[in-house]
Amino acid sequence: MMWFKRRSDASAAEQQDPGQPAVSVTQADGGTVVALTGDWTTSTVAATDHRLRELEVHPGARRMLVDLSGLGRLDTAGAWVIYRLTASLKRAGAEVDIAGASRDADILVGAV
């Protein structure tokens, strides 16, 4: 599936603290891109949990791409919320793809 567009603009908050987890949602080529950036660890994921839960309840698109290319550190807590997001979107009937995951992130998200 080739509808992924790399996001080049970062919010001011992301530029100030690149380790802070962030969620951005953009529309691209008939689908929705959910870009996750920063560190997704036990000590940081609570900051974005509410935003992910909103997406889980109201995905807003039939095609979703979860872009992990901007992830910093990732532990099992971060992997779990990413898994929860993708599983919820699939249950809601969305076609979900993950892109940009490092080898380690891919293994960890797949293991939870």
Image: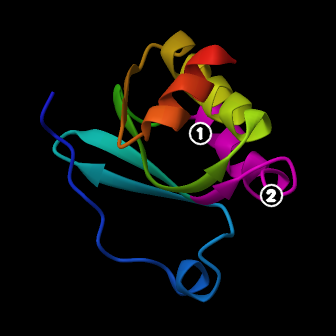
To which residue does mark 1 refer? 55
Type of the residue with mark 1: Leu
**In the rendered structure, does residue 55 fall within the stretch colored magenta?**
yes
To which residue does mark 2 refer? 44
Camera-side residue: 89 or 86?
A: 86
Q: Is residue 49 above or below residue 61?
A: below
Q: Which residues are magenta?
A: 38-59
Q: Is residue 85 above or below residue 87?
A: below
- Image quadrant in which you'd find residue 12: bottom right
Labels 1 and 2 touching (C-beta < 8 A): no
The colour scheme is rainbow
- Image quadrant in which you'd find residue 9: bottom left
Which mark's residue is nearer the viewer, 1 or 2? 2
Identify the residue shown where x is 36% and y is 56%. Answer: 26
Q: Position of residue 34 (x, y in %)?
A: 45, 47
Q: Residues within 10 Å of mark 2 (few under 14, many from 20)?
A: some
Q: Position of residue 4 (x, y in %)?
A: 21, 44
Q: Secondary structure at mark 2?
A: loop
Could one spot residue 59 in this view of the protein?
no
Q: Secondary structure at mark 1?
A: helix
In screen coordinates, is 22 left or right of 95? Answer: right
